Image (cartoon, coloured by chain):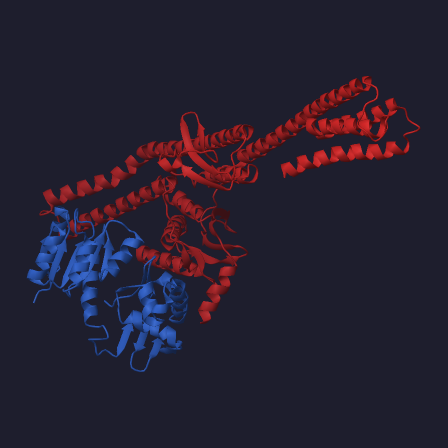
Amino acid sequence: MKLKVLVVDDEPQIRKQLKIGLNGYGYEVFTASNGLEAITLTAQHTPDVIVLDIALGGEPDGIEVCRRLREWSKAAVIMLSVHNEEKTKVAALSAGADDYMTKPFGMEELNARIQAILRRVGVEPVVSAETEICVGDLTIDLVNRLVRVEGEPVHLTPKEYDLLRLLATHPGKVMTHRAILGAVWGPEYGDMDHYVRVFVNQLRKKLRENPSRNVRYILNEPGVGYRFVSRE
Amino acid sequence: MKTIGRLGSYVVALATVATLTVVLLSQREVFTIANVTMFFLLGAVLVAVTRGTGPAFVAALASFVCINFFFLQPYYSLLVADPREVLDLIVFVVVGAIAGQLGANVRQQAEDARQQAHEHDILYRLTRAFNQITIREEVLQALAQAVREDFGAAQTEVMPDTPTSAASLPSATTHYLLLQSGDTVYATLRAAFPEPLPSPRIRLLMACAAQAGMALQRIDLNERARRSLQFEEADRLKTALLHAVSHDLRTPITIIKTSASNLRQFGDTLPADEQAEIAITIETEADQLDRLVGNLLDMSRLKAGALRLSIAFNSLEEVAGDVAARMWQIHKQERIHLNFPDNVPLVAFDYGLLLQALTNLVDNALRYEPEGSQVELRGGVRGDEAFLEVVNHGETISDEVKQHMMEPFYRGKEGRIGLGMPIAKGIIEAHKGELRVLDTPGSGATFVLALPFAKESVIEAQSLGRG
């Protein structure tokens, strides 16, 4: 069965190109030009993924649409924006979006993001019986809480392990600093973002990341949070 | 206080007369009546000069009575034997009164002069203070303070512009000082006094308000001049932008347009790999266009002072890692060498902006890096400075180029418009830091991004790291 994608953008040419491209990648594509139409079409066709522009040239805007959809729809939402602003990204993510992309972007990247989300649906701990995560030289044994790099065991503190496990079980998903703090340290840590940074730094050293050779497991989302690499 | 003071003067007058009486009484047989009268006259004049007309008059009258009672025969009676002596006494009282009046005038003049000097002093101090102030609020504060301390106002309040409500009607004890210059009212100061001010004080108060009005006008004019300079700068930038950018913008647009029309017209007849190549060209040029537009937007935001930093404690190594990874994605080879000591503390900066500044500098450094050699990225903390260094090993930059390379639209060797460096510089300066260009030992250029670093933040970050 073909996966269904709903594209919501007020610019006809963008709707058209996205439709051509996504059709080419094998999705069934619907398009909507405004927020209300998007909600109606979501109810009618139950798409798997919604590609949703934030600025829809009227009310409700993309963030509001996302918030309303989240009340009843399980569709994954990728937000689009022309503004590369951290505030907008955080607002989109906290409205329930799964991911966001800044315009302009290439079709390959959009497809990769859609694939990452769909893969993730099958990996998240609630629904997954997966016991081991392997990315590049990194292996995480979820049952025995063992981490190996290039086959050698790596010693992690319990907090470091929790942090790694949280990120690794959500590959490709942007986790905001606050979400990470809440999940690993507890909600009372509020806005101690630098806590997360210090731990991620230590974790990266232990995992022997080497950015100049593109050996990376934890990616930065400037001003927003972190994203674990998605498996191809 | 005043009544007590005045009462005191009368007591002094009477005491003077009493003392004279006692002293002279002991020598009554030695002195003539003329001597005695002269002494009393001297006493009355002294009282007049020091204590004013009233006490002088009392002193004269008391002297008259005492002379009559103690020194004129018959003693110890107010009877006057010789009627001519009454004349002496009348003259005595008149002289006392006149001397008193003269003394009072002199004292009043001295008092006026002192008051004036005090007023001048208040005005002088205030004016001098105003001249050194460049912030509106401080002028208002200084004025309010002076009104409270020098004028004894019980309460002061600054109101914007002109008060209009009915509650703002002036009364004998409440004054509304319009701080204005020309037709513009910059603010209003409401001052409430415990009792009505005498009119010279009101005049002085108005003078102070006028000075404050002028100070506010000066600050306003300075602010406007500064803003207009900013506009001028923005305007100059815009003109330069139009000239310099049209070429750089039109080139990718031209390539995109010709590529697309080639695809449309000849796409069918071209071999598949050539079609793909044309499509890739369109994508690459669109990226180039996007970068340029992004740079131009950043530049104008930096120039307009509209850049808002979202400062947080961030890791320098993380930024460098991001840049290194991005360069790997572009060049598909290891062209960056990361060199960071362990335990570099977190530093306060805007992650997104510093990432951009470093990307621009590394982009630039890689363009001039010899084939097969790596640009080194170092970072750390020394003293009150956190730094990132981009070490290039290409040709050493001449001092002249160093001077101009940070200016917008400086054209480098490849003739590209240079916005990367000035944007990086603008971002660093927005962080109150500094971008320096040094020579790399051997050859090449080293760019130092220096950020202010507060030592006390180290403790916090390190203790967290062990937590």
Which residue is most to the bottom?
A144
Q: Quadrant of the C terminus of chain B?
A: bottom left
- Residue B392 position, x and y percent, is 44, 51
* Above-or-below relation of B83 to A133: above
Q: Quadrant of residue B179?
A: top left
Give the colour chain A carries in the figure: blue
Give the colour chain B carries in the figure: red
Q: Judge by depth and name the residue closer to the eye, B101 or B77.
A: B77
Q: Quadrant of the N terminus of chain B?
A: top right
Q: Is residue A101 left or right of residue A188?
A: left
- Residue B389 position, x and y percent, is 46, 54
Q: Judge by depth and name the residue closer to the eye, A72 or B137.
A: B137
Q: Is residue A28 visible?
A: no
Identity of the residue drawn at 26% across and 69% down: A170
Q: Is residue B102 visible?
A: yes
Identity of the residue drawn at 35% across and 77% down: A148
- Counting every numbered tag in the picture gives 0
* Above-or-below relation of A96 to B466: above
Q: Judge by depth and name the residue closer to the eye, A81 or B86.
A: B86
Which residue is most to the right?
B30
Q: Is residue A97 left or right of residue B16?
A: left
- Residue B292 position, x and y percent, is 30, 43
Q: Is residue A173 left or right of residue B8?
A: left
* Above-or-below relation of B390 to B250: below
- Residue B253 position, x and y percent, is 22, 40
